[in-house]
Image (cartoon, grey):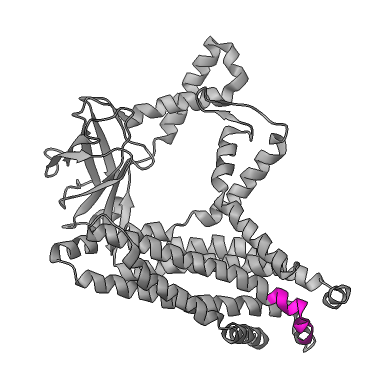
């Protein structure tokens, strides 16, 4: 490991010699200081803080990600192109030690930059919070600068799938011609069945039973926050709809009634409810009464959620930065793996190409959902077919599985909405992003570097 640390130290010296560390640090600090002056918010402390966290952490991750790719590609490719690696390799230092040493040097550089910029964002938030009125500080401490757990209604997937298959069987028995497009018929029936669980007609009500299980013991005298979202095919003259809420069960818990609230569709709304409304079985019952003339739809995925305090902001913030650090570890491995085989410009192009593929995963997901890369007719709900589907769709599915190992984690969104990032989340991010994905690129890069004829390659140039 002494040789590995020596290579890591040389990587640090190179970054300092070219003033790269100082330039990136200056850019990150300028982002933290100048960005708040340019941000337009909704005028509330909560809105400003959420936007500030989203933009500053997003830009920090972007700057560090691009600089990591550029450095990882450049530091190894340049050493090979300028014949410096041959001198190191004849010390003798094993090539895997050179590769790992480069990775450790770049990651320690990232750690210092992330710590500097992350600490600056945290101190800025705390400083601005102390300058707010007491009521606004309370909102921040309870809804944004906090670590909140989430509880949802149980999944109805089993019931929906069973009803879908039952209706599908009846449908194909009655209309045998529908067998030609079973996948599309099943999808349509499933959406119809799913609507029964989501739609609230005018004058009707919709109950949710939220199970807290073991969390109930820690929620005594603690306020809860209901987060809701609904859609509507009809438009209201005012652009909003009235919402009446009842929380609790008569004769079992206290009853809390709220409303009418004027809520806009297609957006998230959050409101506080009093503590101690959970029954003895750990169930919180929430009822929505639709007093409008329009039908409202609450999506099963994110239509209703209850948030509760789990811990403080600082530890949660540190875990969020830890996940961003895992992203940097993967990008560093990708850059070094590309530089193990390719020249600096080609390696940088290859690494940025992989990043572009990741960002365009929505297109691949859409193709997989439709089962084809051919044109999709949104009005008829049908799509064509392509001979390339046999190869392309399986490739897209495998690519999406690999991408989702990384994209399953969203620390920036979680921190900006006061959501908990647990130690389990951080451990899972480390295993999936660093060990599985990063390890795959690392092993590939080391094998390529070990097999590469460095002297011959330089002689041919």
79 magenta-colored: yes
Q: Position of residue 402 (x, y in %)?
A: 60, 53
Q: Nearer the viewer, residue 367 or 427?
A: 367
Q: Position of residue 118 (x, y in %)?
A: 40, 73
Q: Pick out the residue farthest to the top.
A: 174
> Would you identify the image quadrant in which residue 228 lies?
top left
The magenta span reads: 76-87
Determine the residue positioned at 21% across, 30% down.
290
Residue 353 seen in the current view = yes
Look at the magenta stretch and give its main secondary structure.
Answer: helix
The answer to whether residue 175 is left or right of residue 315 is right
Within the image, what quadrant is residue 426 found in? Answer: bottom left
Residue 279 versus residue 414 in the image, above or below: above
- Please state the horizontal and vertical placement of residue 107, each as a whole percent of the image: 56, 75
Left/right of residue 417 with respect to residue 83 in the rendered view: left
Q: Position of residue 189 (x, y in %)?
A: 47, 23
What's the residue at 15%, 57% (across, down)? 221
């Amino acid at each position: 490991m002494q040789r590995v640390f020596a290579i890591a130290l040389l990587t640090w010296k190179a970054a300092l010699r070219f003033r790269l560390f100082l330039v990136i640090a200056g850019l990150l600090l300028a982002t933290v200081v100048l960005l708040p002056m340019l941000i337009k918010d909704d005028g509330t402390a909560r809105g400003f803080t959420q936007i500030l966290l989203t933009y500053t952490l997003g830009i920090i991750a972007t700057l560090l990600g691009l600089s990591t790719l550029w450095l990882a590609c450049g530091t190894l490719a340049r050493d090979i192109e300028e014949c410096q690696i041959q001198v190191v390799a004849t010390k003798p230092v094993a090539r895997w030690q050179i590769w790992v040493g480069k990775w450790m040097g770049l990651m320690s550089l990232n750690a210092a930059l992330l710590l500097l910029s992350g600490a600056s964002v945290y101190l800025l938030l705390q400083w601005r919070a102390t300058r707010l009125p007491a009521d606004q500080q309370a909102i921040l401490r309870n809804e944004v600068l906090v670590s909140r757990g989430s509880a949802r209604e149980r999944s109805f997937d089993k019931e929906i799938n069973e009803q879908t298959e039952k209706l599908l069987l009846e449908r194909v028995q009655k209309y045998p011609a529908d067998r030609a497009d079973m996948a599309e018929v099943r999808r349509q029936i499933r959406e119809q069945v799913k609507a029964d669980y989501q739609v609230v007609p005018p004058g009707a009500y919709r109950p949710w039973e939220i199970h807290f299980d073991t969390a109930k013991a820690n929620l005594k005298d603690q306020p809860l926050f209901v987060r809701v979202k609904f859609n509507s095919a009809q438009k209201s003259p005012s652009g909003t709809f009235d919402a009446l809420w009842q929380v609790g069960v008569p004769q079992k818990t206290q009853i809390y009634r709220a409303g009418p609230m004027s809520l806009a569709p297609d957006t998230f709304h959050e409101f506080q409810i009093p503590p101690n409304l959970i029954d003895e079985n750990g169930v919180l019952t929430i009822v929505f009464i639709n007093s409008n003339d329009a039908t409202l739809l609450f999506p099963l995925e994110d239509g209703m959620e209850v948030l509760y305090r789990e811990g403080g902001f600082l530890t949660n913030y540190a875990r969020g930065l830890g996940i961003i650090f895992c992203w940097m570890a993967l990008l560093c491995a990708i850059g070094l793996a590309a530089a193990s085989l390719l020249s600096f410009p080609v390696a940088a192009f290859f690494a940025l190409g992989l990043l572009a593929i990741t960002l365009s995963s929505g297109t691949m997901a859409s193709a997989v959902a439709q089962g084809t890369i051919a044109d999709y007719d949104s009005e008829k709900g049908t799509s064509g077919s392509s001979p390339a589907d046999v190869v392309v769709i399986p490739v897209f599915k495998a690519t999406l599985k690999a991408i989702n190992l990384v994209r399953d984690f969203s620390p920036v969104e979680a921190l900006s909405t006061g959501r908990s990032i647990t130690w389990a989340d951080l451990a899972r991010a480390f295993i999936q992003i660093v060990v599985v994905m990063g390890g795959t690129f690392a092993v590939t890069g080391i094998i390529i570097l070990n097999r590469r004829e460095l002297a011959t390659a330089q002689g041919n140039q």
